[in-house]
Each structure stands twice: as C-alpha cells, then as structure tokens.
Amino acid sequence: MRNAIKLLTAAVPGLAIAGLAGAMLLAPAAPADAQSMGDLLGAGKKVVQAATVSDAEIVAYFGQMSDEMDQKNPLAPAKSPHAVRLAKLTQGLKSYDGLTLDIQAYLVDEVNAFAMGDGTVRVYSGLMDRFTDDEVRCVIGHEIGHVKLEHGQKRLKRALQQDAALSVAGTASGGVRRIADSRLGGLIQNVMYAQHSQAAETQSDDYALTFMAANGYDRMACATAMDKLAAMGGGGGIALLQTHPNPASRAKRMRKQIG
Ligand SMILES: [Zn+2]
C-alpha cells in the first residue's frame, strides 16, 4: 500500500523503485513549449476518465499490483511450515463476507501484512513467527476489513484522479487498461504504504473484532497483538507500525470494546 513514502527503506526491500527511477531517466524530456493547452485539456480528460474508472478496472489494477508484490517477495511454498500453518488458520476463508480472498504468506522476516482491493492478502513470516494463531487471525480479519470497506479501492481511485499520467500510461489489454510497469512501484507506494485514515483503521479494527467473534476466535488476541506491536515499537523498522496508528491506543480501545 500501499502510500507516502514512509516505508520505502525498511519495509519494502527490493520494491521496483529502481525500475521506476530508471524509466524516468530514459524518458525523453518534454520541451518546455510542449505543455500546450491541448496537453492540458488532454490531461483533464484523463482525470475525468479516472474518476469514472470501473470496478473491473480497479480490480485489474490491484491484480497488477499484487503480481508485482508477489514477484518482489518470495511466496511461501505450499508445503512450507508457514504456508501449512496459514492454510490451517484461514480454512474456509477463500470466500468470506461476499469477497473472494487469496491469503498467502511471504517468507520475509518483517512484521507486516497487507490487503489489496482484489482480495489479495499477504502475511509476512516475520509476523507469523511472533504472533499466536489467534493474533495472526486478528491481523487477517483487520486486512479483510480494509478490503470489505473498500479503503484501498478508494485510495486507488484518488491516486488515479490526482495523477492523470497513471491512466495516460495505461494501454488496452483484454479490454482493460493496464498501468505501465514503470509506474507500478510508485502506485504501490501511493496506494499501499501510506496510512489509511484513523477512521478507516478504527473501522477495520472493529471489523476484526466482529470477524473473531463470528468465527469463534478469541477477540482478546487482537489486543495482545497490539501489545506486542507496542513492545516492538522502540527499535523502529516495524512495517505495521509505520502504516498504522499507535498500537497502545488501539489495544486500549479494543479492550474497551471487548468489555
Ligand atoms: Zn489497517
């Protein structure tokens, strides 16, 4: 997310930023007089198109970003301990609450997880190694909340509206435009790695608590997961802390909700 570039260094090793920079260097510089009224009007037209971007396009764009992330991060092979454990923890979640979900683990020693608007959810092995089963489930519930409540989808639409070049770069493929590969890294930063609003995070926390209760899991695991994150905070570099609000406050609020 996904996203203002807080995470560039710590959380996303190897993300395709180098490719983005390289592409920008290769692009011919536009002559100053090329910024004609026609160009400006053209850019304005793209903004309108982006504003009416279809749900199918949004899903396709998220699919592109998911593929990019999966190429940059090693997915846990099906028989690996992390994949086996995660499959057990997410049994019955291939479709949930009207969503089609693809939940898999990355073998990356970071305390991180993310969801994409196409139903892709990735949990990093570093988080799995530090969290109990129910704590991992709560993180997954929180991420499903972001998908269900369309937080990333709204962010992507905003990004497309604010950066007309993103849609200019798109080329038709199977009837659906694609984001140019050279722009993907930047879009992922914008959509995945900026903080959602406090309100969105609170909604997802509430969704997670409901998810836990609905599936018979221990809701208190949400609070203890936050306690762990708070304890890790001192050293910095914890990806989930850079994209999420203060975990101690979240733990306190969750305990109040649980009662
Ligand atoms: Zn969140």
Image (cartoon, helix red, strand yellow):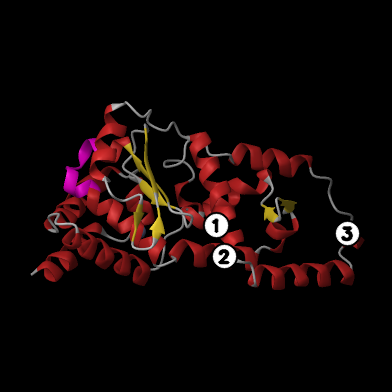
Which corner quadrant holds the C terminus? Answer: bottom left
Q: Position of residue 233 (x, y in %)?
A: 26, 48
Q: Is residue 190 above or below residue 237?
A: below
In this picture, residue 74 sits left or right of residue 259: right
Q: Is residue 90 above or below residue 146?
A: above
**Residue 50 seen in the current view:** yes
Q: Residue at label 2?
A: 55
Can you identify the residue that label 3 sits on? 32
Relative placement, left or right, of 53 versus 33 is left
In three-dimensional space, the C-alpha distance between marks 3 and 1, rounded to whole angstroms, equals 36 Å
Q: Secondary structure at mark 1?
A: helix
Residue placed at 35% from the left, 72% from the top?
Answer: 199
| Residue at numbered disc 1 | 59
Q: Quadrant of ligand 1?
A: bottom left
> Which residues are drawn in magenta?
128-136
Q: Indicate the quadrant where residue 95 lies.
A: bottom left
Q: Amino acid at mark 3?
A: Ala
Q: In which quadrant of the rendered view does residue 170 lie? A: bottom right
> Looking at the image, which residue sits at the far right?
33
Q: Are marks 3 and 1 in contact (CB under 8 Å)?
A: no
Magenta stretch: residue 131 in it? yes
Q: Residues within 10 Å of mark 1 (few under 14, many from 20)?
A: some
Q: Is residue 3 visible?
A: no
Q: Check whether the beta carbons of the residues at disc 1 and disc 2 lie within 8 A of each other.
A: yes
User: What x and y, as percent, mark residue 173?
Assistant: 71, 49
Residue 48 in the image: above or below residue 117: below
Question: Mark 1 belongs to which amino acid?
Answer: Val
Considering only order in the chain, which callout, 1 or 3, is on the residue closer to the N terminus?
3
On the picture, is 28 further left or further right than 185?
A: right
